Image (spheres, rainbow, N blue to C red):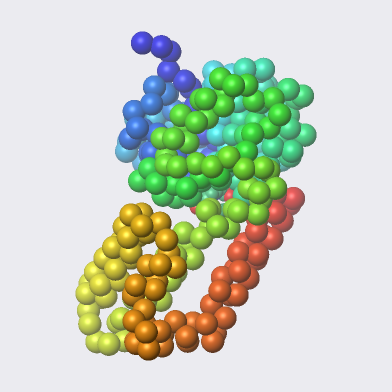
């Protein structure tokens, strides 16, 4: 068997776990090392839960890594990239998943010629259903691109975009799952107001959402599906009219803009 690809995660938080658990489920030929900042207890727990190597300080293991995935907050990237700069070797491939940190910033912080990529996944990587977007820096080889496809393929579906587009679409694929979960919370809250139990409210709302997602998956046309539910002059139309009266579409647009603005800011802090 070929030597496994050694992937080093710098940062072992929620996103890192979602990604490496997705990769491990896909049985890629990889050796995964994870490192965390301070939180030894979490590192220990992850080391027991998954077949991964854990290190409290990534610096010593760094020379052995083929791929380095930065899954730490945008705010610590400058520091981490500075630390990496003198150690990096020409074959190593650096991928960040951080909001606001594109290849331009990575290339400026690392030696000329370093292969870099920006991956914006979402937490559904955990169930191998992340809709990820990504973009490559200018020095990524065809082999590294193929490798990257294997990694992202293990966590779901992916779309290559320009760097600017990844900035602009971070809200839609990276953050909007939180919008959707919030919508679910709001429906649950409303359901509870009619005197059912928490368990009943959860069942009603979750199964409705799961069924609707399955319909979207099958038919791919949200407007058509909405129309099928909306009997002319009926009940749903009254509910949708209330959403429209309260600028539902506009509010979503505003939430997207605010998310992207903050993502960009984080990349500059
Ligand atoms: N949570 C999500 O849905 C998504 C998150 N991201 C990005 O993923 C990255 C991590 O986010 P989460 O996993 O949600 O956060 P998190 O707070 O769960 O994890 C952050 C990890 O970074 C580590 N860390 C902090 N300072 C560090 C330092 N100086 N050096 C090395 N590691 C350090 C922490 O110990 C922790 O393990 C962020 O850059 C975020 O923009 C991207 C897409 C989606
Ligand atoms: O909230 C955040 O900053 C990250 C970026 C995309 C999803 N979570």
Left or right relative to 61: residue 108: right
Q: Residue 114 sits in which quadrant?
A: top right
Specify the quadrant that holds the N terminus.
top left
Q: Is residue 20 above or below residue 187?
A: above
- Residue at x 52%, y 30% (from the top left corner): 148
Q: Is residue 109 left or right of residue 130?
A: right
Q: Residue at x 36, y 57 (%)?
A: 219
Residue closest to the far front: 232
Q: Residue at x 75, y 25 (%)?
A: 111
Residue 122 is situated, as x and y percent measured from the top left of the image, at 48, 49
**Foreground of the two, 52 or 246:** 246
* Picture coordinates of residue 185, whole percent (x, y): 39, 72
User: Can see residue 60?
Assistant: no
Q: Position of residue 226 (x, y in %)?
A: 39, 71
Q: Residue at x 64, y 34 (%)?
A: 136
- Residue 250 makes an appearance in the image: yes
Residue 135: name its quadrant: top right
């Amino acid at each position: 068997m070929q030597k496994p690809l050694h992937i080093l995660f710098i940062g072992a938080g929620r996103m890192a776990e979602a990604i490496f658990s997705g990769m491990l489920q896909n049985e890629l030929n990889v050796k995964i090392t994870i490192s965390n900042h301070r939180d030894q207890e979490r590192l220990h727990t992850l080391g027991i839960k998954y077949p991964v190597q854990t290190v409290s300080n990534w610096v010593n293991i760094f020379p052995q890594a083929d791929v380095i995935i930065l899954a730490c907050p945008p705010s610590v990237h400058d520091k981490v990239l500075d630390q990496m700069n003198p150690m990096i070797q020409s074959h190593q491939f650096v991928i960040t998943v951080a909001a606001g940190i594109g290849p331009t910033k990575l290339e400026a912080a690392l030696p000329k010629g370093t292969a870099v990529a920006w991956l914006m996944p979402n937490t559904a990587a955990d169930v191998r259903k992340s809709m990820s977007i990504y973009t490559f820096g200018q020095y990524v080889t065809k082999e590294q691109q193929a490798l990257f496809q294997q990694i992202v393929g293990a966590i779901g579906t992916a779309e290559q975009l320009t760097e600017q587009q990844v900035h602009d679409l971070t809200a839609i694929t990276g953050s909007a799952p939180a919008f959707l979960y919030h919508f679910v919370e709001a429906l649950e809250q409303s359901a509870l107001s009619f005197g059912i139990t928490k368990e009943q409210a959860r069942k009603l709302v979750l199964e409705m959402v799961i069924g609707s997602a399955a319909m979207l998956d099958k038919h791919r046309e949200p407007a058509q599906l909405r129309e099928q539910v909306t009997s002319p002059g009926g009940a749903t139309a009254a509910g949708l009219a209330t959403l429209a009266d309260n600028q539902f579409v506009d509010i979503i647009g505003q939430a997207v803009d605010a998310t992207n603005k903050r993502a960009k800011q984080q990349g500059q802090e």
